[in-house]
Amino acid sequence: MHQQDLPFGVGVVPSFARGLPLTLAAIHFASLVHRGRCRESDHAPFIIHPLEVAAMLRSSGAPDAVVAAGVLHDVVEDHGATLSQIEQRFGSEVSVLVGALSEDEAIESYEARKGALRAQVVAAGAEASLIFAADKLAKVRELRVRFGRARWQGEADPADGAAKLGHYAASLAALDGLIPASPIVRQLRFELEALDALPPGRRPLSRPAPARRPPGAQRTAVAPAGLPRLSG
């Protein structure tokens, strides 16, 4: 591995990947495939997304091959590699998982394509579903950032936001049928609930002037607007 190709800098390895040879090789490979791309939510280098997915998988106790597949889950869809190349470099276990997570681009309709992907993932079993859950958890968090940025700037919500939310909700329903006790699935459920119940707000057009306190009045703590006051 060439140190200059590591995403965190020369000789710097993400801590979750230490001691995972397949994952380290996958990080090097994915860094080359995704080089020059940025993710839409915050314009960070795209490689941060598969690294986030892989870190979640490792934290959940997933083995090296599953974590490596998490790192590589987008490389086929991004036309950076073929499944046969993945198998040659990383073995059949990893290539099968990456294949299960790669959608069929021949299906033109977004809803139909994503529906086929969900069915494909569930049919592949628990490990593919765990990677899929981590991917969706990261994507829901990115979508919250996109909603928040657009609303704070007074712009319309992202045009693809509603369709993505529908896909993420359907993904949660599918995952609930296979790995409902997974901490990643539980967190995905919370993120979707929070996005619905506590969505990002818009910048206020004007801020009211604070009320003047009468001389000698005692200052009291006030909870921020929209948040419950905590009692001790």
Image (cartoon, rainbow, N blue to C red):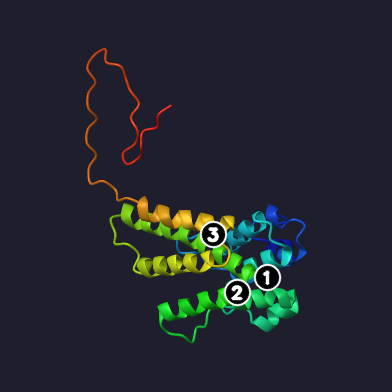
For residue 76, above or below residue 145: below
Helix, strand or loop for disc 1 = helix
| Badge 1 density bin: few <14, some 14–19, many ≥20, Cα 10 Å | many
When asked about the image quadrant of residue 54, the answer is: bottom right
Give the labeled residue for mark 1: 29
Q: Residue at the location (68% across, 77% down)? A: 95
List x then y, in percent, for residue 185: 54, 59
Residue 39 vertical position relative to residue 118 in the rendered view, above or below: above
Q: Amino acid at mark 1?
A: Phe
Q: Which mark is residue 75?
A: 2
The Cα–Cα distance between marks 2 and 1, rounded to whole angstroms, is 9 Å
Q: Quadrant of the N terminus?
A: bottom right
**Quarter residue 63 falls in:** bottom right
What amino acid is at disc 3? Val
Pick the residue in front: 202 or 194. Answer: 194
Question: On screen, 221 above or below 215?
Answer: below
The label on residue 185 is 3
Q: Earlier in the sequence, mark 3 or mark 2?
A: 2
Asked if residue 199 can be seen in this view, the reply is no
Seen as rendered, the residue at the extreme front is 177
- Indicate the position of residue 224 as horizontal and vertical percent values: 34, 36
From mark 1 to mark 3, how far is it between C-alphas? 28 Å
